[in-house]
Amino acid sequence: MGGMLPLPLSPKSIARAGFGAYGGQFLGAGQAFVSNNYSKYFSSSAMRYYFDVTEAYTFNKLRLIACPFLHKGSWARIPEQVAGGLTFKPPRADINAPDLYIPLMGFWSYVLAASTLQVRRGTFTPE
């Protein structure tokens, strides 16, 4: 164990390990592009609210979607008092809060499953 190299944990260290000295530059350029071009459409603080989920929240929300008759309790969202007024708790703290994690993962799962089926049939084209 003493002679093993530590595993890269962050995206930058993975890029450096895979692409050498240029990996960090490529990743940095990609992050700069995303932050400059997408920030005018998607504010990271506004989007962070909708992706603030945990594994337990995801499991419970999928269970709620699949079997709504098992839900015991209120269907109302939980309000939270803050200095600027009244807001709602994030999805990790409120099962009734809207999130974008589950729809996005559902979309990607559909795309991967449909692509896999097309590859198996031999009808897949990347266009």
Image (tube, rainbow, N blue to C red):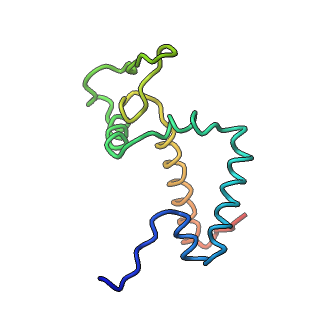
Residue at (25, 25) in percent of width and height: 72
Quadrant including the N terminus: bottom left
Callout count: 0
Left or right: residue 57 versus residue 21 is: left
Left or right: residue 94 versus residue 104 is: left
| Picture quadrant of residue 39 | top right
Residue at (63, 71) in percent of width and height: 23
Q: Position of residue 65 (x, y in %)?
A: 38, 36
Q: Position of residue 34 (x, y in %)?
A: 69, 51
Left or right: residue 16 versus residue 81 is: right
Question: Please, which residue is most extreme toward the bottom here?
Answer: 3
Question: Please, which residue is most extreme toward the front here?
Answer: 2
Left or right: residue 109 versus residue 25 is: left
| Picture quadrant of residue 7 | bottom left
Q: Position of residue 71 (x, y in %)?
A: 28, 28
Nearer to us in this view, 79 or 84 = 84
Residue at (50, 34) in percent of width and height: 49
Nearer to us in this view, 116 or 4 = 4
Residue at (53, 66) in percent of width and height: 116
Quadrant including the C terminus: bottom right
Q: Relative to 8, is 66 above or below?
A: above
